[in-house]
Every structure is written in C-alpha cells, then in structure tokens.
Amino acid sequence: MGSDDIASLSGRAIALHGQGRYAEALDCLHTLETHLKDNPALWSNLGIVYRDSGDLARAEQYLRRVCAARPADPAAHFNLALALLRSGQLREGFREYEWRWQLPQFAEQRRHFTQSLWRGEPLEGRRLLIYSEQGAGDAIQFARYAPLLRAAGAHVIIEMLPHVERLTTWLDGQFEVVNALTPGVEFDLQCPLISLPQRFATEVDSIPPPARFSIPAPEQARWRERTARAGMAVGVVWAGNPRHANDRERSLPPQHLTRFTNQPGVQCWSLQVGPAAANLPAGITNLAEELTDFAATAAAILALDLVITVDTAVAHLAGSLGKPVWLLLAYASDWRWLLGREDTPWYPTMRIFRQQRPGDWDDVIDRVLSANFPPASARHDPAR
C-alpha cells in the first residue's frame, strides 16, 4: 500500500468517524493496521473510534498502547482519560485528565497565578481559590466540592463566570463568591474546579451530592405565578453552546419538540437561551428574555414539574436543584454520563434517554413520550 493509499484510507476513516459510521471507520483503520506496524497515531485513532462506538475495553487497550509508546504525549493521556472516565474508572481517569493543561485547546483557559496550585496538601486555615475553567455546566457540576474543602479546613473562595456568579451566592453555606474581574481577592492557594475530583480521589461510589442552592422566596413566588397554568409544566432545552466541539451531535433539531406540545395536559416552557432560542417551535412559551443569568433560570426551573434537555448547563442546574430532569443524549455522549445507564451518580433525580443509533433522535423522543411523567405537584416541593 503506497503513501497515497494510506493517506486516502486514513482520511476516509476520519470522515466516517465524523458521520457516526463507526464500524466502517474501524474497517478502514484495521486495514491500515495490517500495513502500518507499531504506529501510535493509528492506535490513537482506533482508540478514539472504539471509544465513541461504545467499545470502551478495546478503546482503553489501544490508548494505553499509545501512552506506553509516547509517555510524554499529553493528547495520548487526555484521550485515555476520556475513555477511563466514560467507563467509570474515575480515580485514574481524573488523574489522566490533568494532562489537559498541556493541550492547545485548553491553553486559553489556563490561569497563571503567583499563588501555588493546591495539590491535596493540608488546608487548615488556608485561603483557597477554586475557579471555573470550562463552561457553566462544569462549574455547576463541580461546585459540589466546596463544602468538602471547607470541611477540610479551607476558607473557600469561588470564582465563577459572571452569568453563574449570582446563582453561586445562593449556594448553601454562604461561600465567598467572586469573578475574574473582582479586585483585591486574596488567597494562598488555587485550584481549578475540575481538578477537585482528582484531589479527593473520587470514584463512582464516592461522588459527593450535588451542590445545593437555596432560591430566595420572592424569586420562587414570582416564577410560580409566571408559570401558573393548568396541566404539567415542562421546561425544554434543545441546543447547547454552539462553540462546543460536539454541539452538532448533542443538540436536538427543534422540530422534534412539537411532539411534546401535542401531549394532552402538557404546557411547555422554553429554557433555551442564545441564538437557538429564535427557532422556537409553536406551542412553547418563550422565556429567553427573562432568563438573564443562571440564577433566573434556577428560579424558573423550581416553578416547573419537569425539565427535558439535551446535554447542556441546564441539565446540571436542574439536577442540582433536585428537579426531575430527563437528559437526551447523543450516541457518543460526554464522559460524565458513563455508558449504558439510564441514571447517573452525579444527579439522583436525573433520567437518561440515549440515542441507540448515531443521529437517531426520533427513537429518543418515542421513548420520552412513552415514559411515565412525574406528578404535576412536584413543582410545589420545598426548594432545595
């Protein structure tokens, strides 16, 4: 096989992988494997395709071979991390995930402080800054570690993105909350939020409970009045951040939502913000202009009975609030939702509806509509 044939077959494998045609992509890569011996780049591609196809055991085998051949390669370790985390091997997965800081796609998120990075040493009496490094969903998911740090003796300062800052001031425990532009913040140590599971050696059975947010009573009352209609109040979100690398796969074409609006006794409320909010299907009440930050969205969620959402920050927020939340997942989903489960150890009130075939949202919606909806009285449960 000549170099042009190798390049052509490799390019075809990459294209097929991008289309979710994993078996065909693997056929191409295994054909290459018979001609390219001891090729870490090929092993990496095989590991990634096996990971996305759902064969995590084979993915791990190939990605470990890459790490053994290239022990200083951050991409090799990062790809292994994603496979380990998705398979539930959290302790080793989060350790490998620390290699992210050496990758170009994380370079702009990396912070440079004069204060030392906290690596797990004793915290008694130290002022520790923990800060958001990726999206709002990640910040909400990993804010759960703040009480553990306080229990370990730290004075915890939480730095959040501006649109998550007000919500974080409602975090139970009354933590000091700042954003990147807050002047005069003094601290002794610092740590990014998504490094905290590694510091606490988190495993599936030791994941801390979600962050708890106490929504002020006036906010609750305003939204209960706003959504007071007969029937079940369901919040919907169909699109994530368009800048996310996997957004095309994880976002739901909005026309699928018309099947919810046709259900007797169901009132749909859009929790969608951003450009996608303009593509509002008929029969859904648009709340976009009122959802000015995640604090407003949290108060709105408390007034609803159920949230149905794709993999975006609202899923983490609804799960943290203890609301019934149904998560619609693409076939090759994010590592945090593990594999083959309809539940998640991260959020006890979440139920997962996964694509059984790449790109097939129709089957997902069929299963949602055949599920037992929670009782409408759930919206009146005491706020968390």
Image (cartoon, rainbow, N blue to C red):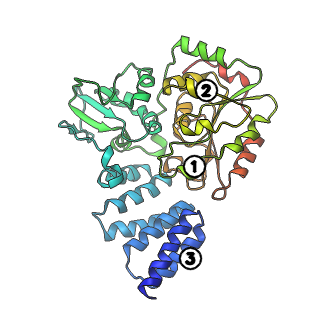
Left or right relative to 60: residue 302? right
Q: Name the mark nearer the viewer: 3 or 1.
A: 1
Q: Nearer the viewer, residue 319 or 148?
A: 319
- From this view, report whether residue 1 is shown above or below residue 379: below
Q: Nearer the viewer, residue 7 or 224?
A: 7
- From this view, report whether residue 49 is shown above or below residue 110: below
Q: Which mark is residue 287?
A: 2
- From this view, report whether residue 137 is shown above or below residue 10: above
Q: Residue at x 50, y 47 (%)?
A: 336
Q: Name the mark nearer the viewer: 2 or 3.
A: 2
Q: Residue at x 43, y 32 (%)?
A: 144
Give the residue at mark 3: 27
Q: Which numbered disc, 2 or 3, marks the residue that appears first in the sequence?
A: 3
Q: Quadrant of residue 149?
A: top left
Q: Amino acid at mark 3?
A: Asp
Is residue 116 visible in the rendered image? The answer is: yes
Is residue 371 visible in the rendered image? The answer is: no
Left or right relative to 251: residue 266? right
Q: Which numbered disc, 2 or 1, marks the residue that appears first in the sequence?
A: 1
Left or right relative to 293: residue 348? right
Asked if marks 3 and 1 touch (Cβ < 8 Å), the reply is no
Q: Amino acid at mark 1?
A: Arg
Q: Name the mark nearer the viewer: 2 or 1.
A: 2
Per the image, label 2 sits on a secondary structure element best described as loop
The quarter in which the C terminus is drawn is top right
Give the distance between the C-alpha atoms of the residues marked 2 and 3, in whole angstroms: 47 Å
Q: Amino acid at mark 2?
A: Leu
Give the residue at mark 1: 250
Per the image, label 1 sits on a secondary structure element best described as helix
Q: Position of residue 23 (x, y in %)?
A: 60, 70
